Amino acid sequence: MNKVIDIVIIGAGASGLMVASQLENKEVVVLESNPKIGAKILISGGGKCNITNESIDASDYLANPYFVEEVFRQFDQNSLLSWIGKRGLKPKIRSKGEYFCRQSANELVGIFKKETRKNTIALNTQVNSITKRDELFYIECQNQNYRAKKVVIASGGLSYAKIGASDIGFRVAQSFGHTLINTAPALVGFTLQKEQFFFKALSGISTEVTITVGERVCDGALLFAHKGISGPVVLDASLFWQKGAISIDFLPQWSFEPYLDSKKFISSLLPLPKSLSKAFLNEWQIVDRPINQLSKKEKEKLKQLKHYSFAPAGNFGYTKAEATKGGVNTNEIDSKTMMSKKVRNLYFVGEVVDVTGKLGGYNFQWAFSSAVVCAKDLKGV
């Protein structure tokens, strides 16, 4: 058995690397199952990594808002932008406030390589289990075992199995008596009921919509796909959907009333891709003709485009999901330190915690913020 290490971090993704980057004068070992660090960072955002957003609020997350607010109070998006800026990364901002690396995600990973160069990073190292005896943690791996005074679980969620996603963080949490909020794919497309199978013929078509899931309202582009519906607005809606109906407004910022006496053909009048308009007309058995010639019943059918309601059959699953919702119950974690309230010197950061954000840089911001809060406690600040 090796000597006792100060801090072992499980996972060299966004949160694990950020924790390690903050620790000086500590013996730190990072255990990563992948052959390289920052695997998810490198493939996210089309290879440019959506680092954060200019507007970050607890309402952008499926989480306990008070927990999230306390973490962001200690390290927010402005703190992050300042931190990476001092290290030479000036991200590019896009129209919806998202910050991306200018060239590629390698810029961000490069910062972490430099900031963690004094730490030991053990790649291709799969953690099997963690136990605690006499105030020491025993980390059992496939090839080597470790002993540590403190352990940080930064192992991520279940999405992106192709880059080594695993449930080790959840298993460790449960083994130490933590409650798991049910995990499920998030930021993922919806599959369809038979009544919506006509959507499949529209694969590749995109249109701006508003989706309402319970009390949550999401705006953005919907993309019709072979398996169902996807696109940014659907991925955001999936974060808040569990089961039951969603409502889609295919005509946001548009009203029928001024046009009910129009002589324009329906498919030309509606501000939708023509093939989409015709698909709905065909489904509702309405002949494409001037809207003023429609019967009252036909006009009422057409108005369903403002509130098209259906219950998704399910989602595309973890292989297509960009995040995992659910995770370690935040009621059992100290928001000022990210330490377990059940096990002293055991910490949880990033996606393994029951905090999941929308698209737009929110999940990376959570990873970085929770990591810095954790690191401050590890340093004794």
Image: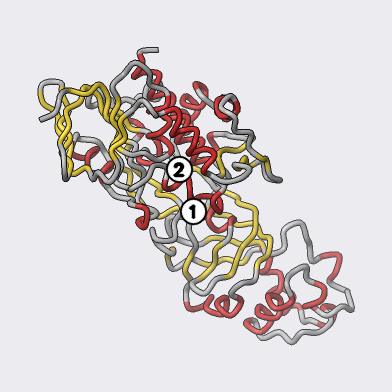
In which quadrant is the N terminus drawn?
Answer: top left
Q: Is residue 11 left or right of residue 138?
A: right
Picture mark count: 2
Residue 86 sits in which quadrant? top right
Among numbered discs 1 and 2, the one appearing first in the sequence: 1
In this figure, which residue is indicated by the disc labeled 1?
A: 187
Front residue of this view, candidates 59 and 262 = 59
Where residue 110 sits: x, y (%)? Answer: 49, 37
Q: Amino acid at mark 1?
A: Leu
Circles 1 and 2, Cβ within 8 Å, touching? The answer is yes
The residue at 59%/29% (across/down) is 88
Where residue 323 sits: x, y (%)? Answer: 43, 50
The residue at 83%/80% (across/down) is 265
Q: Is residue 162 left or right of residue 232?
A: left
The residue at 53%/34% (across/down) is 58
In which quadrant is the C terminus drawn?
Answer: top left
* Callout 2 crowding tier (Cα within 10 Å): few <14, some 14–19, many ≥20: many
The residue at 53%/75% (across/down) is 196
The span from disc 1 to disc 2 (Cα, nearest Å) is: 9 Å
Label 2, secondary structure: give it: strand
Answer whether residue 269 is visible to the viewer in this image.
yes
Residue 130 in the image: above or below residue 267: above
Where residue 2 sits: x, y (%)? Answer: 14, 28
Residue 90 sits in which quadrant? top right
**Colouring method of the image:** secondary structure
Report the disc number at residue 356: 2
Report the disc number at residue 136: none
Residue 304 in the image: above or below residue 236: below
* Callout 1 crowding tier (Cα within 10 Å): few <14, some 14–19, many ≥20: many
